[in-house]
Image (tube, rainbow, N blue to C red):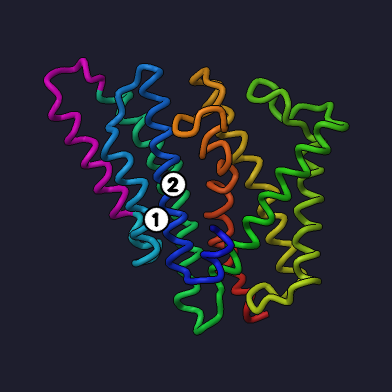
Amino acid sequence: MFIGALKYKPWAVAVIVVVVLGLGAVEYFDRVREKGYQPAFVPGIVACVAAPAAVYHYGTGALPLVMMLAFVACAVSFIGAPNLESNPMPNMAITSLGITWIGMLGSFGAGIVALSNFGGGNPIGTDTLCLLAIGVVANDIGALFVGSAVGKTPLRHWISPNKSVEGFLGGTVLTLGAMFLVGVADKSSTWNSTGDLLLLGLVISLMAPIGDLTESMFKRNLDVKDFGSIVKGHGGILDRFDGFLFVMPAVYYLTITLQPWFS
């Protein structure tokens, strides 16, 4: 579906981004409710869907407005509660965490896609998101195989004992290798410089593990195995896309700073 959308139209890719973030938000708010929190469920999910939609149509300048409206909507939902038993402060905080983590960070995926609409026929956004996806997957695969084979030094033992420094280095090497091979095999009209591609790979290699560790940290704090609530036993949307959430804002700003299609 993702590849088909890339080949079709940018808006089709944006729809996938919105759907993935919406499903991720449902999983997150379901899990925190199971653990006794009372988040503003509907405003939280609406914000996580509205943020990427607004960014795709109006640019990242729309994000402050979306975040403000979401905060006001959450505040009103707790102001309407009958008493302090709604525990407004921690529940507002847990709602805002979900909106920021999933909705705001994820919306940069739609921002990347939207670059294709202003590229004068150059598929800037779809090219970049495709490379981003290749890089994140390569990073996960490299970290998994190298970490499983020779990993001995934990990155952060209290968060995830299975994530190792050796795995991090393996993921970095495979990500840089994947970006180099893409540059050799596919002369993209967007990322046409090997140096730019390697810099893209480096950014992905740094940010994807941070996203992965952040999600693992939240799971450990909540004492859950995964965030999956929609497809049981599959790990969940957030477990599949945790690295993407941190990579997409970094790659968005890297892209508009480098403007690699002019290289």
Residue corresponding to mark 2: 21
Please tell me which residue is depicted at 53% across the width and 69% down the height of the picture: 125
Question: Dot 1: what SS?
Answer: helix
Q: Given the current orientation, which residue lies at the most extreme right position?
A: 150
Please tell me which residue is depicted at 44% across the width and 33% down the height of the picture: 230
- Whether 37 is among the magenta residues is no
Highlighted magenta segment, given as a residue range? 64-87
Q: Label 1 sits on what residue type?
A: Pro
Give me the C-alpha separation between circle 2 and circle 1.
8 Å
Please tell me which residue is depicted at 15% across the width and 24% down the height of the picture: 81
Q: Label 2 sits on what residue type?
A: Leu
- Whether 78 is among the magenta residues is yes
- Name the spot of residue 157 as percent of width and height, x first: 70, 22
The reply to whether callout 2 and callout 1 are in contact (CB within 8 Å) is yes
| Picture disc at residue 52 | 1
Would you say 180 lies left or right of 4 here?
Answer: right
Q: Front-most of 1 and 251?
A: 1
Q: Which numbered disc, 2 or 1, marks the residue that appears first in the sequence?
A: 2
